[in-house]
Image (spheres, helix red, strand yellow):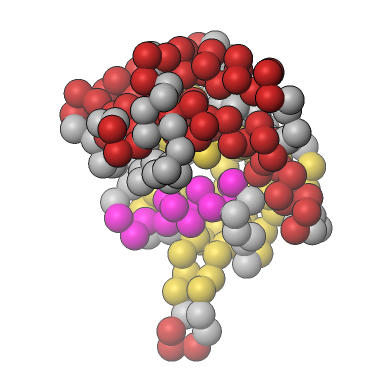
Amino acid sequence: MIKMKKINKIYGTGASKVEALKNIDLEVKENEFVGLIGPSGSGKSTLMNIIGCLDVPSSGEYYFGGESVENFNHNQLAEIRNEKIGFVFQNFNLLPYATAYENVEIPMIFMGVKAKKRKSMALELLDSVGLAARATHKPGELSGGEMQRVALARALANNPSLILADEPTGNLDTKSGDEILAIFENLWKQGHTLVVITHNPNISARAQRIVKLIDGTIENNGK
């Protein structure tokens, strides 16, 4: 599903130049669960942004689903993000004035899904993460773990081929974090492809493969 060859990402020029990623070679197969770990500043989030087509590399080749991303325009990159990738972030990124159900429904609105189908799908997704009873609650009425479950249900709304998570347990207590990781593991067993970027050491017990980044390079590819 993902193939990267000699990916580099450089920010700035001259004395202020920062090499965030250096010669990254990475492959993720369909229905693989990869944990991407490393200390702060190792390049994990930069790599996530490139995998998720939120940013482009300075050099190197990136193939998503067998297609080279290099020559894609803004609309094509947006199409990949909207239709093929489900994002889960550390800070949840939920709309505070919308209910859990409405937050999950948003991606389907952009995809033109009819209202009746949106409602049934959103409720089904919330039920799949154990939050059917909280569908009408707004983020301010939910715990951190519950908000991340809503965010995960939203990420699944358009049935993406890849779920990409950046520190999904970073703002959660240990119990809630382990519950979220258990949901990820279950999604993988159901056939989803996952790349989870995390500091959480418990990812090692859940993921199929661990890739370790140090100073912008892959130290261990988990093969």
Between 175 and 5, the residue placed more toward the observer is 175
Secondary structure character of the magenta stretch overall: helix
Residue found at x 36% / y 28%? 137
Q: Residue furthest bottom?
A: 15
Expressed as whole percent of the image width and height from the top left, the position of residue 86 reads 57, 35
Looking at the image, which is closer to me, 6 or 139? 139
How many numbered callouts?
Answer: 0
Q: Quadrant of residue 74?
A: bottom right
**Which residue is painted at 62% across and 36% down in the image?**
107
Image location of residue 157, percent across then percent down: 59, 27
221 sits left or right of 62 in the view: left
Q: Residue at x 47, y 69 (%)?
A: 19
Q: Nearer the viewer, residue 108 or 136?
A: 136
Q: In the picture, which quadrant includes the N terminus?
A: top right
Q: Residue furthest left?
A: 174
Residue 129 seen in render: no
Q: Is residue 49 above or below residue 67?
A: below
| Res. 103 in view | yes
Residue 197 falls inside the magenta stretch:
no
> In the shown orientation, is residue 151 left or right of residue 119?
left
Q: Which residues are magenta?
A: 40-52
Q: Residue at image x 44%, y 52%?
A: 45
* Residue 194 x/y as whole percent: 52, 29
What is the x, y in percent for residue 185? 42, 18
